[in-house]
Image (cartoon, grey):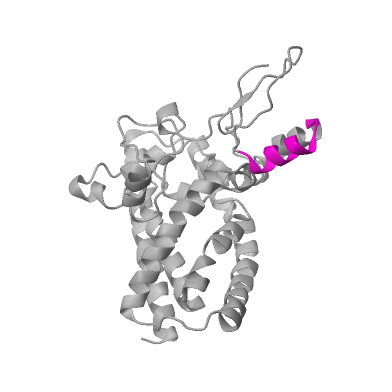
Amino acid sequence: MTSDVLESLGNRIDEVFFYIGVAVLGIELIEGWIKGSLKGRTFADMFASASTQLPFILVEVVVLTAAYGLYTLVSAAFVTWAFPISVGTAVLAVLVADFLYYWEHRLAHEIRFLWLQHAVHHSSRFMNIITGVRFGPFEGVWSMIALFPMVLIGFPPELIIFGNLVVIAYQTWIHTELIGKLGPVEWVLNTPSHHRVHHGCDDKYLDKNYAGILIVWDRLFGTFQVEEETPRYGLKRDFDSINPPVVWFSELPQYFRDLKAARSWREVWMRTFGSPDWSPQPKPDDRTGTRSLHGVDAAK
């Protein structure tokens, strides 16, 4: 297998999941039309989700180019051996990329600086295929950083990009309410049922099911939650905007307000690199209260 064949294979896999997503979207729209559940706000939310691709793609082109160059330079300068490009190493690259994606995704929920971008993906109150393309403008930066260990292991840049592409492409079809539970498949693969849980803001669903392709990572690391009832989607805090620019930068206003109100450099650090729900202990005369997970004001 050559790098050209690998690139062609990656593009074909991406196309397959794209067409699956288009088919699911078509069925979702037909079902919604028959049931009368398609409202103007549903389409407005879809438009807001789709609009996030504008800034995301503009940034992603630069990020991918820079990452590929950095991976190549580091690999040539510090890694004395490399995996050959073959069917076996392509499969291995997908498995390693999927493992790293689990931790990339989990940390994006646990560190506020990363959550500032990833929260955009969780900000819709709807679950449909278009929600799957709802990204923060700079999410790709963290993704490329999280994949860097693959360079040090010995994966050439072509295999790293291929592995990441497959992991991301796979997730196109899991953003839907159209598909129910899939029996034994649920034990191994990430499915729409598992991912609906991940988008839920109910307390028992928060920060669960981080998987990309294999749900086994969540089972192994204690973050798995089965879908018991239909989740309430979106952020825990009151966010329902369908204004594209507001959606793109939904977390930044509160973040900058928190930095402005910070009373010490430690608080600035924790507001940035602590968990999204971190808050300093209020003083007896402090009526601002604390904030619960994903930016909800717990007291005012």
Total numbered labels placed on residues in the image: 0
In the rendered view, tell whether residue 181 sits above or below residue 142: above
Q: The C terminus lies in which quarter of the figure?
A: top right
Decide which of 93, 199 is in the foreground and name it: 93
Q: Which residue is at a point 32% across and 29% down the rendered structure image?
A: 229
Q: Residue 115, image x and y in percent?
A: 59, 44
Residue 30 showing in the rendered view: no
User: Residue 244 in magenta?
Assistant: no
Whether residue 19 is situated above or below residue 217 in the rendered picture: below
Horizontally, is 42 left or right of 73 in the view? left
Q: Nearer the viewer, residue 219 or 54?
A: 219
Closest to the observer: 39 or 253? 253
Q: Position of residue 1 (x, y in %)?
A: 36, 86
Snapshot quadrant of residue 2: bottom left
Please, which residue is most extreme toward the bottom here? Answer: 2
Q: Is residue 131 visible?
A: yes
Q: Quadrant of residue 206?
A: top left
Residue 74 rendering spot, x and y as whole percentages: 60, 77
Q: Residue at coordinates 61% horizontally, 31% vertically from top-left?
A: 295
Determine the residue positioned at 60% across, 35% down.
Answer: 241
- Magenta stretch: give its range: 261-274
Residue at image coords 65%, 43%: 273
Percent across and percent down for residue 167 are: 41, 61
